[in-house]
Amino acid sequence: MLTQTAFSQQKRLSILPFPAVYYSPETRWAYGAALTATFRFKNDSLQARPSQMSLGIVFTQEKQSLYYLPFQLFLKNAQYYFNGELGFYKYNYYYFGIGNQPVPKELFGVDFPRVRLNFFKKIYPHLYAGVRYQYEDYRITQTVPNGEFASERVPGTPRSITSGAGLGLFYDTRDIVFFPSKGITADIAYFNNAPFWGANVFFNRLSADFSGYQTLFKKVVLAGNLFSSFTWGNAPFNMLSELGGGKRMRGYYQGRLRDDNVLLAQGEVRFGIFKRVGGVVFGSTAVLGNQKDIVRWHDPKFAYGTGIRFTANRRDHLNIRFDYAIGQDGGNFYFTIGEAF
């Protein structure tokens, strides 16, 4: 029989093993595993915001490998908020060009470590202020003969070191961290990447990420997200503002849309189906721009899709997510943990 103390401690930790198996043209079969831990620190109340860490290791038939550790930690009953990612990636990506100057799809290989750290302190109810740091050593390892990378026509090739620091504000009134039914978040960040911090390139970025949630009626939630990113200076191609992938502009290959500046709006209707199973429908639109044409309003991009959710952790409503989305190049599947926003 569990004592009250043991029962309380049991509630503080939930561990979810998650197999990672997928197929893509650039990797062939990929396989691995992820382990997600949701927890509360010993001195925090059981009603405090939950913290989360995930450890993932993936290998592919093309001898690629990914090691990653994203985290978000709420300490002292959410008086402090730390989040970020540590990882190392040996991978292949497709390159499609920058902005409205597309090039034929080109595969390239890259090795890079990634460090992203954000440290915030609550300064007012729901409002945090803090500092940020990011680092990547991006080394191009494989190129197509006579292609964009082999000819070094891509900014930042064959190697770019980005190291930058900045400031940030974070506002959060969500009722539940992983699957909000009401509230808003606002994440505003400024980064300066310069030789002073250890970089070999100089550029600045200002970004803002806003999300809102509202319950329409029982088990139906409307979620919306607005994202903007403006970059100026001499950023390498991998540090430009980009869209695509499983979070921003699902339906496009990650990095398919890339330029100095992006503006994105996406919305999602989330609804229950049966017990732990739910569904979503979503859509998004975006515009891009550069340092000359700040925003190209005449050239919007669109995507839409639907998905299924399975609640793996009922206490904190942490979902396994399966989405199918369609962009201008066709459709893409996404299978992961947690919501897009």
Image (cartoon, helix red, strand yellow):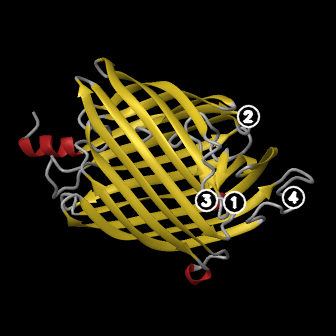
For the residue labelled by badge 1, is the local secondary structure a helix, a strand or a loop? helix
Can you identify the residue that label 2 sits on? 25
Q: Position of residue 315 (x, y in %)?
A: 23, 35
Q: Nearer the viewer, residue 309 or 104?
A: 104
Residue 89 lies in quadrant = bottom right
Q: CA distance from mark 3 to mark 2?
A: 34 Å
Which quarter of the rendered picture does the C terminus lie within?
top left
Q: Secondary structure at mark 2?
A: loop
Front residue of this view, candidates 176 and 186: 186
Q: Residue at x 71, y 39 (%)?
A: 27
Q: Characterize the local packing of mark 1: few (<14), some (14-19) or many (20 or more) Cα atoms within 10 angstroms.
A: many
Identity of the residue furthest to the front in this view = 298
- Where the N terminus falls, by quadrant? top left
Neighbour class for label 2 at 10 Å: few (<14), some, many (≥20)? Answer: few
Badge 4 local density, few (<14 within 10 Å), some, or many (20+)?
some
Give the labeled residue for mark 4.
Answer: 150
Image position of 194 (left or right of 225): right
Element marked by disc 4: loop
Q: Are marks 2 and 4 in contact (CB under 8 Å)?
A: no
Instruction: Give, as a three-letter code, the residue at label 3.
Output: Ile
Label 4 – label 3 distance at C-alpha: 30 Å
Mark 3 / mark 2, whichever is N-terminal: 2
> Residue 155: image x %, image y %?
75, 64
Which residue position is annotated with label 1?
237
16 shown above or below 279:
below
What kind of residue is marked 1?
Phe
Residue extending furthest toward the right: 146
Amino acid, disc 2? Pro
The disc, 2 or 1, on the residue closer to the chain's N-terminal end is: 2
